[in-house]
Structure formats: structure tokens, C-alpha cells
């Protein structure tokens, strides 16, 4: 469960940092600020967090493959 937690935590941190930077740059409308922060942090996480995303994906797919009952 650790890779899932690390990836999620890093995504939340990226969102918070993006939110803070955009707020400090003068974006005051809350709805626009949230939407733009979500989009920018998503793009940044796609580039910067690929290693963590791959680890999370491997962990989740391993768990899903292990828990399937075999009906032969």
C-alpha cells in the first residue's frame, strides 16, 4: 500500500503548491483557482511522478491478480 500512499500524497502536495503559487500570482477567483490548479498539477504530476505512478500501478495490478479466484 506504500506506493499508493506516496503517489497520492505527492499529488496532493503538487496541487497545494500549485494552488499557493497561483494565489500569490494574483489569481483570486476561487473556482478558477481550483480548476487551474487541478489542471496544472495534473500535467506536472504526469511528467514528474511517472516513476511513482508506475510503482503504484504495479502494486495495484499485483494485488488484483492475486485476489482473483481461479474458476476452472
Image (cartoon, helix red, strand yellow):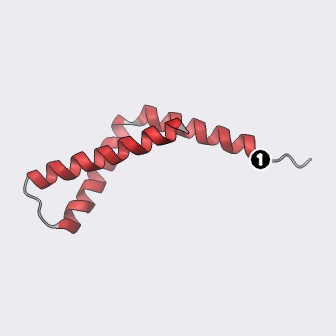
User: Helix, strand, or loop for circle 1?
Assistant: loop
Q: Residue at x 50, y 35 (%)?
A: 54
In the image, residue 25 sits, relative to residue 10, either above or below, namely below
What is the number of callouts on the image?
A: 1
- Asked if one can make out residue 43 in the rendered structure from this viewpoint, the answer is no
On the image, which quarter does residue 9 sit in?
top left
> Is residue 55 left or right of 12 when viewed as pictured?
right
On the image, which quarter does residue 52 sit in?
top left
Mark 1 neighbour density, 10 Å: few (under 14) some (14–19) many (20 or more): few
> Is residue 33 left or right of 57 when viewed as pictured?
left
On the image, which quarter does residue 62 sit in?
top right
Residue, far top: 51
Q: Position of residue 4 (x, y in %)?
A: 50, 41
> Is residue 61 left or right of 17 when viewed as pictured?
right
- Asked if one can make out residue 62 in the rendered structure from this viewpoint, the answer is yes
Q: Position of residue 6 (x, y in %)?
A: 44, 38
Q: Position of residue 20 (x, y in %)?
A: 18, 50
Q: Residue at x 43, y 40 (%)?
A: 7
Q: Quadrant of the N terminus?
A: top right
**Residue underneath mark 1:** 68
Residue, far right: 72
Q: Residue at x 52, y 33 (%)?
A: 55
Q: Position of residue 46 (x, y in %)?
A: 37, 42
Nearer the observer, 29 or 50: 29
Amino acid at each position: 500500500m506504500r506506493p499508493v500512499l506516496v503517489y497520492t500524497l505527492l499529488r496532493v502536495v503538487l496541487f497545494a503548491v500549485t494552488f499557493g503559487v497561483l494565489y500569490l500570482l494574483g489569481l483570486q477567483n476561487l473556482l478558477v483557482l481550483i480548476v487551474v490548479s487541478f489542471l496544472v498539477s495534473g500535467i506536472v504530476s504526469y511528467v514528474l511522478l511517472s516513476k511513482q505512478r508506475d510503482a503504484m500501478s504495479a502494486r495495484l495490478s499485483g494485488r488484483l491478480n492475486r485476489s482473483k479466484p481461479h474458476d476452472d
